[in-house]
Each structure stands twice: as structure tokens, then as C-alpha cells.
Image (spheres, rainbow, N blue to C red):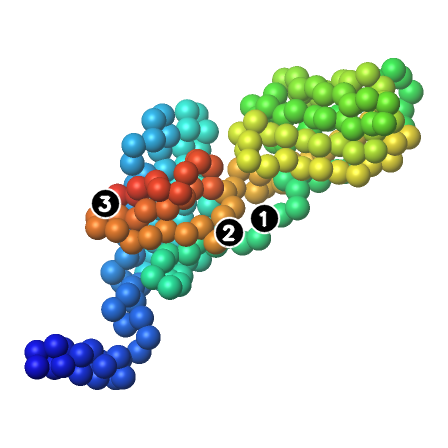
């Protein structure tokens, strides 16, 4: 008899309650600040705001980065999405042929301190050439007919910018875009656990990282 009563009660509740009623998460219950735990030499935090926007902070050594976007609850999980990642972190502003025995690439940015931290790969059928920028943002490579240039920034190792260029040109200038240090996330999934969130990170391997709620 008790089994029949419990079964009847379960069927009655399933009829009057919406699907996933017991697994629904309210925005107010999870809004707050969460700090990444147990990752050596790395600091990161997620701020989930009640208005469904978020801020993601990351610090490693002297590198500080930030991302923003919107979060939502989907099937019992917190899903973070920033604005779509731009195609490139630099803009090609000059491409021309010049006399000389080198292929020269110049990186321009008002903050001179970041200029030595770029790397350039010139891809050519005759062989690829690779070089790093000097303190003034210049890279000089042996002259090649490069059809493609790839530019890497040391502080954003998760991505690079690729450009198709005229193989007859050997002088290129790039302007750094303002979002070069920004963190972008797509469908970053976090599960609500006691005292925090469990999930991944755009710059750290693993899907079981723990973020402890601090307020």
C-alpha cells in the first residue's frame, strides 16, 4: 500500500510540475564571485552578475587578462559565452615591395613594452622563415616570396593571426587591435557543486577545475 501511495504521489507531482523542476537553478542562487583552486602559479576568477553578464579574470606571472560576456542556465549547467572572437588580433596596414635582401615585418602599438613579444612565420613554397620582433617591433627575415604570414603574440598562446599576402611584397606593417589581450569563450560549461562550480577554463587543460564561491 505504501508503495502504491508513493507511486501515485510521484505521478501527481510529475503532472503538475514543469520538466526539470527539481534541477532548475535560479540566477540569484549562483550569482557571485568564484575563485579557481589548486592551479599552481595561476590565479583566475569568474564573476557571475545577477543581470546574466560575467567577467572572467586570469593572471599568470606578469600577464593579466580579462574576458566579458553573458551567462545562462541550460539543462542544469552554467554556460558562458563572450562576443565572437575576431578573425585576427592585428590589422595589416601596409604591404609593398621594397629594395633589399630581406622580408621585413613591423608591429605597431603605442605600448612599446609589448613589441618584443611577437613572432612571425612567413610561409613560402621555397621554404618557411621564422623570426621574433626586436625591441622596436621589427622582424627581418631572409627575402622570400611569402604567400601567407602568421603572427603570434606570446601573451595569447591559444591563438594566432593569419594573413594572405602578395608574394611579390617584402615589407609589411601590422597594427595591433585593442582586443589582443581579451579572453574569448564559447559554450564554457560549469556545473554547480557545493560551495562552487566545476568545469573547464579557456586557457587551462582539464574539465574538472574547481572554482570556490567567495561571496
Q: Is residue 171 left or right of residue 17?
A: right
Instruction: Name the quarter where the N terminus is drawn.
Output: bottom left
Kindly state the secondary structure of the residue where label 1 is placed: loop
Q: Which residue is mark 1?
A: 85
Viewer-proximal residue among 89 and 112: 89
Is 51 located above or below residue 214 in the figure? Answer: below
Q: Residue 126, position in %: x, y?
A: 86, 23
Kindly state the secondary structure of the residue where label 3 is placed: loop
Q: Is residue 71 left or right of residue 175?
A: left
C-alpha span from label 1 to label 3: 29 Å
Q: Residues within 10 Å of mark 3 (few under 14, many from 20)?
A: few
Kindly state the secondary structure of the residue where label 2 is placed: loop
Q: Which residue is mark 3?
A: 214
Asked if labels 1 and 2 touch by Cβ distance under 8 angstroms, the answer is yes
Instruction: Tell me which residue sits at (40%, 63%) in the image.
Output: 74
Q: Residue 95, position in %: x, y?
A: 83, 34
| Residue 16 in view | yes
Instruction: Tell me which residue sits at (53%, 29%) in the image.
Output: 155
Instruction: Tell me which residue sits at (40%, 32%) in the image.
Output: 59
Is 92 located above or below residue 146 in the figure? Answer: below
Q: Residue 61, position in %: x, y?
A: 41, 24
Query: First in sequence: mark 2 or mark 3?
Result: 2
Viewer-proximal residue among 171 and 200: 200
Which mark is in front, 2 or 3? 2
Which mark is in front, 2 or 1? 2
Within the image, what quadrant is residue 90 found in? Answer: top right
C-alpha span from label 2 to label 1: 9 Å
| Residue 215 in view | no
Query: First in sequence: mark 2 or mark 1?
Result: 1
Residue 186, label in figure: 2
Instruction: Tell me which residue sits at (63%, 25%) in the image.
Output: 118
Amino acid at each position: 500500500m505504501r508503495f502504491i501511495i508513493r507511486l501515485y504521489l510521484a505521478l501527481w507531482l510529475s503532472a503538475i510540475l514543469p520538466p526539470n523542476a527539481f534541477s532548475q537553478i535560479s540566477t540569484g542562487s549562483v550569482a557571485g564571485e568564484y575563485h579557481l583552486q589548486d592551479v599552481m602559479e595561476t590565479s583566475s576568477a569568474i564573476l557571475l552578475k545577477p543581470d546574466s553578464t560575467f567577467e572572467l579574470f586570469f593572471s599568470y606571472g606578469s600577464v593579466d587578462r580579462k574576458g566579458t560576456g553573458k551567462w545562462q542556465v541550460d539543462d542544469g549547467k552554467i554556460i558562458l559565452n563572450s562576443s565572437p572572437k575576431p578573425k585576427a588580433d592585428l590589422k595589416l596596414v601596409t604591404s609593398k615591395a621594397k629594395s633589399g635582401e630581406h622580408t621585413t615585418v613591423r608591429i605597431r602599438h603605442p605600448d612599446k613594452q609589448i613589441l618584443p613579444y611577437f613572432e612571425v612565420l612567413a610561409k613560402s613554397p621555397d621554404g618557411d622563415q621564422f623570426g621574433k620582433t626586436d625591441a622596436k617591433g621589427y622582424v627581418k627575415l631572409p627575402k622570400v616570396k611569402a604567400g601567407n604570414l602568421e603572427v603570434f603574440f606570446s601573451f595569447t598562446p591559444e591563438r594566432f593571426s593569419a594573413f594572405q599576402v602578395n608574394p611579390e611584397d617584402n615589407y609589411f606593417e601590422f597594427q595591433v587591435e585593442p582586443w589582443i589581450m581579451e579572453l574569448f569563450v564559447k559554450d564554457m560549461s560549469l556545473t554547480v557543486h557545493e560551495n562552487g562550480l566545476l568545469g573547464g577554463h579557456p586557457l587551462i587543460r582539464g574539465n574538472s577545475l574547481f572554482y570556490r564561491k567567495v561571496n
